Image (tube, helix red, strand yellow):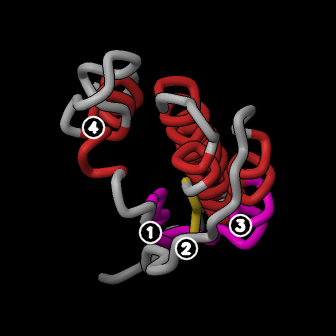
């Protein structure tokens, strides 16, 4: 004897879960951009302005946009995340030629770096 069971509400529950996951990914990505920006040493603002957000693959260019406040990077991230879909990889990157030295702690303003420290902090919220 075979039969089937019809479950009501599964589709709605699945859609709600997907929406919650997207919301968490969006918030975590914004936290990374803000955290990196806050930790980024600032002289001219070029390194801070070099932080970029993109879906699918990292940016490969240096935008050469000084931004002492970090607002340009945040606005770009918010705009990029508007297209976020479930399963998308979000890349927060910086291609300013000296940013790897800053990440390695060459600045007294950020002796522990910015990117890895921030990613660890944000990831820690989900452990």
Quarter-of-image position of residue 111: top left
Q: Are marks 3 and 2 in contact (CB under 8 Å)?
A: yes
Query: Magenta segment range?
Result: 78-94
Q: CA distance from mark 1 to mark 2?
A: 6 Å
For label 3, the residue is 80
* Badge 3 vs badge 4, beta-carbon distance below 8 Å: no
Nearer the observer, 84 or 117: 117
Q: Position of residue 69 (x, y in %)?
A: 74, 32
Q: Earlier in the sequence, mark 2 or mark 4?
A: 2
Circle 1 is placed at which residue position? 89
* Residue pointed to by mark 4: 116
Q: CA distance from mark 1 to mark 3?
A: 12 Å
Residue 24 shown left or right of residue 58 in the figure: right
Residue 122's place in the image compared with 102, above or below, is above
* Residue located beneath label 2 in the image: 55
Contact between marks 1 and 3 (CB within 8 A): the answer is no
Q: Residues within 10 Å of mark 4 (few under 14, many from 20)?
A: some
Is 69 in front, or is 81? 69
Name the residue rendered at 72%, 44% in the picture: 67
Please say if the residues under marks 1 and 2 sit with CB atoms less than 8 Å apart. yes
Q: Is 37 displayed left or right of 58 in the figure?
A: right
Q: What SS does tag 2 mark? A: strand
* Residue 21 visible here: yes
Q: Say which residue appears at 56% left-offset and 25% top-offset.
A: 38
Is residue 91 on the magenta stretch? yes
- Alpha carbon distance from label 3 to label 2: 7 Å
Where residue 72 appears, as percent x and y from the top left, is 77, 50
Task: Determine whether, in the image, residue 46 is placed left or right of residue 127.
Answer: right
């Amino acid at each position: 004897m075979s039969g089937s069971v019809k479950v009501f509400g599964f589709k709605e529950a699945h859609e709600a879960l997907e929406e919650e996951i997207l919301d968490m990914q969006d918030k975590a990505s914004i936290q990374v951009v803000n955290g990196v920006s806050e930790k980024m040493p600032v002289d001219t603002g070029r390194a801070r302005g070099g932080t970029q957000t993109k879906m699918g693959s990292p940016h490969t260019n240096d935008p050469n946009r000084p931004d002492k406040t970090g607002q340009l990077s945040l606005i770009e991230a918010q705009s990029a995340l508007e297209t976020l879909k479930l399963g998308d990889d979000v890349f927060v990157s910086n291609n300013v030629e000296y940013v790897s030295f800053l990440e390695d702690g060459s600045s007294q303003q950020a002796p522990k770096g910015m990117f890895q420290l921030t990613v660890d902090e944000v990831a820690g919220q989900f452990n």
